């Protein structure tokens, strides 16, 4: 009896200490707070399935007509830009403090980290269409070009072009560097400058004919490689302000607000911005074909076009996502 | 044997009840009332019902976010104070001191840029500036030696009178 009592007492005391209220607080940060905003979106399949990222570190799968996210991983860091390698089933995610993370698309495991300069981060990364190079520049102005076929070896391009920032790699292995008021097309294999383009803005897309799509503050520009000059220069014509719940509670404000993203198919250009709309333009003539105004309730941060060019996806800063069928 | 087992079980239950009650009352005591205390913290974040940051008081303040990414204030651009954010988490203005030179300033920002600034220099003098895009700007400043009023429209200085040189 005495032994039993002793055992029970010991058990209760152990239970007491294991139940005691620990007051250790979770490490708090001033960043990675906003859990809603989708910062970037990329297709991971032919259509209907995309990968999205948030400031709060979630990297998730979104499928058309599914209301909920399918979490791939939570990296506990802000994620700004995503790229997806279809051949390797690999997600590249640029983060605030963890460099570039290489994440297995199937199980969400972080397989590798590409380091960047301490205290710096890359807001945009670009994976070449042939999936040979991953490029970008950090907030201190350092360029990065990783060779995916050579164990992610960092190619030293900083000495070749000072004060130039790498934004894009085309299918021929040409690197596009942004300099003050111009772009430089630099061939990696030849190790020399191929061409200089007198154009400003952010290079966002290159088509099969080597035409270039640029974003300025509130305008997009199509650089036509045939005539070696800007062929189109357009702005969103107005901002549709919604002041009530009814569909008619709107007012057209004649302002062209900042554009945040753009892409193009064979015959159309898609642009979006802080006016929460997507505008569809004829790629050849520049005619405004369509305006998608009433779907997103926040700044559209990113758009992507499906590989078959039949679907567009858009995400916004309040967690909105929409798949658009393209005729 | 059975009676002995139930006695032990009863005793165990009694002891468990006493211990759990003690834990409960101890927990009640740890919910502290701060209303009469002074809090000393490095940062304070106010979030809305959806978890989006709307006010941050901190030293230093974080770099601003911009439509899906974060931009750096730069090596010497660090600031401390109060910052306000809109429902998308976009920095829209603050009342801060910079951590290097020592200016104090109040800023009001659009979604794309700073548009108004009210600033005082640590060595004396102050200025108010408001501006839009395309080179439209109004500056009003006063120092120990002089005053200035500058108006710029489309990047060109604007004259107050037609005969002004």
Image (cartoon, rainbow, N blue to C red):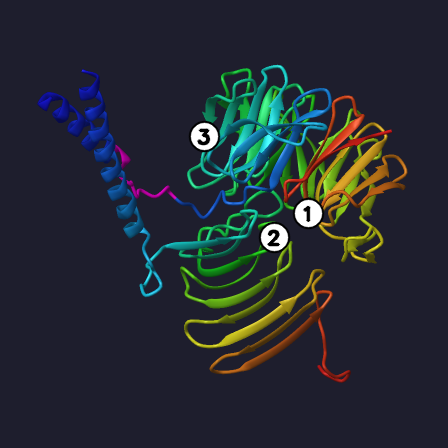
Residue at 50 percent across and 50 percent down: it is B63
Crowding at dot 1, Cα within 10 Å, few <14 / some 14-19 / many 20+, comes out as many
Residue at 45 percent across and 33 percent down: it is A98
Q: Give SS at disc 2.
A: loop
Residue at 79 percent across and 53 percent down: it is A239
Q: Is residue B108 left or right of residue B105?
A: right
**Label 2, on which residue?**
B87
Between disc 1 and disc 3, whose residue precedes? 3
- In this rendering, the answer to whether B99 lies above or below A216 is below
Question: Which image quarter: residue B148?
Answer: bottom right
Look at the numbered discs 1 and 3 and tell me whether their residues touch, using CB distance below 8 Å: no
Q: Give SS at disc 1.
A: loop
Residue A36 forms part of the magenta stretch? no
Question: Which image quarter: residue B81?
Answer: bottom left
**Label 1, on which residue?**
A298
Look at the numbered discs 1 and 2 and tell me whether their residues touch, using CB distance below 8 Å: yes
Q: Which residues are magenta?
A: A18-27
Crowding at dot 2, Cα within 10 Å, few <14 / some 14-19 / many 20+, comes out as some
Q: Are marks 1 and 3 on the same chain?
A: yes
Q: Name the disc covering residue A115, or none.
A: 3
Predominant SS along the magenta part = loop
Q: Is residue A198 visible?
A: no
Percent coordinates x, y for residue A117 in the rendering = 44, 36
Percent coordinates x, y for residue A179 in the rendering = 63, 42
Q: Chain of mark 1?
A: A
Q: Chain of mark 2?
A: B
Residues at marks 3 and 2, CA–CA distance in whole angstroms:
33 Å
Percent coordinates x, y for residue A269 in the rendering = 81, 36
Percent coordinates x, y for residue B68 in the rendering = 60, 42
């Amino acid at each position: 009896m005495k032994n039993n009592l002793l055992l029970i007492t010991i058990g209760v005391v152990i239970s007491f200490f294991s139940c005691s209220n620990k007051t250790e607080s979770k490490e708090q940060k001033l960043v990675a707070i906003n859990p809603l905003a989708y910062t970037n979106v990329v297709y991971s399949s032919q259509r209907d399935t995309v990968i999205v990222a948030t400031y709060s570190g979630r990297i998730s799968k979104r499928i058309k007509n599914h209301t909920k996210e399918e979490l791939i991983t939570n990296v506990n860091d802000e994620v700004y830009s995503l790229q997806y390698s279809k051949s390797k089933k690999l997600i590249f995610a640029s983060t605030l403090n963890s460099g570039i993370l290489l994440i297995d698309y199937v199980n969400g495991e972080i397989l590798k980290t590409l380091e960047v300069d301490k205290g710096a981060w890359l807001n945009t990364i670009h994976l070449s269409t042939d999936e040979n190079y991953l490029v970008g520049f950090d907030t201190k102005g350092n360029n990065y070009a990783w060779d995916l076929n050579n164990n992610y070896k960092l190619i030293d391009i900083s000495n070749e072009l000072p004060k130039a920032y790498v934004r894009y790699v085309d299918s021929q292995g040409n690197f596009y560097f942004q300099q003050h008021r111009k772009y430089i097309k630099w061939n990696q294999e030849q190790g020399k400058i191929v061409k200089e383009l007198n154009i400003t803005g952010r290079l966002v897309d290159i088509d099969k004919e080597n035409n270039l799509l640029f974003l300025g503050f509130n305008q997009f520009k199509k650089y036509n490689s045939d005539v070696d000059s800007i062929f189109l220069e357009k702005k969103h014509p107005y901002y549709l302000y919604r002041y009530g719940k009814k569909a008619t509670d709107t007012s057209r404000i004649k302002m062209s607000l900042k554009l945040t993203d753009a892409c193009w198919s064979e015959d159309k250009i898609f642009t979006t911005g802080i006016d929460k709309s997507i505008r569809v333009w004829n790629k050849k003539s520049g005619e405004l074909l369509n305006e998608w105004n009433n779907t997103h309730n926040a700044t559209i941060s990113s758009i992507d076009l499906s590989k078959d060019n039949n679907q567009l996806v858009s995400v916004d800063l309040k967690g909105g996502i929409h798949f658009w069928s393209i005729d | 044997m059975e009676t002995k087992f139930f006695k032990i079980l009863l005793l165990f239950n009694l002891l468990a009840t006493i211990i759990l009650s003690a834990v409960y009352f101890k927990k009640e005591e740890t919910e502290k009332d701060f209303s009469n205390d002074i809090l000393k913290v490095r940062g304070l974040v106010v979030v809305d019902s959806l978890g989006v940051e709307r006010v941050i008081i901190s030293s230093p303040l974080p770099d601003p976010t911009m439509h899906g990414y974060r931009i750096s204030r730069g090596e010497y651009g660090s600031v401390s104070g109060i910052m306000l954010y809109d429902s998308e988490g976009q920095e829209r203005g603050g009342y801060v001191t910079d951590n290097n030179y020592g200016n104090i300033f109040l800023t009001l920002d659009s979604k794309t840029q700073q548009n108004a600034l009210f600033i005082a220099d640590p060595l004396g003098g102050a200025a108010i500036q408001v501006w839009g895009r395309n080179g439209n700007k109004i500056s009003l400043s006063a120092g120990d030696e002089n005053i200035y009023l500058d108006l710029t429209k489309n990047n060109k200085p604007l004259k107050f009178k037609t005969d002004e040189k």
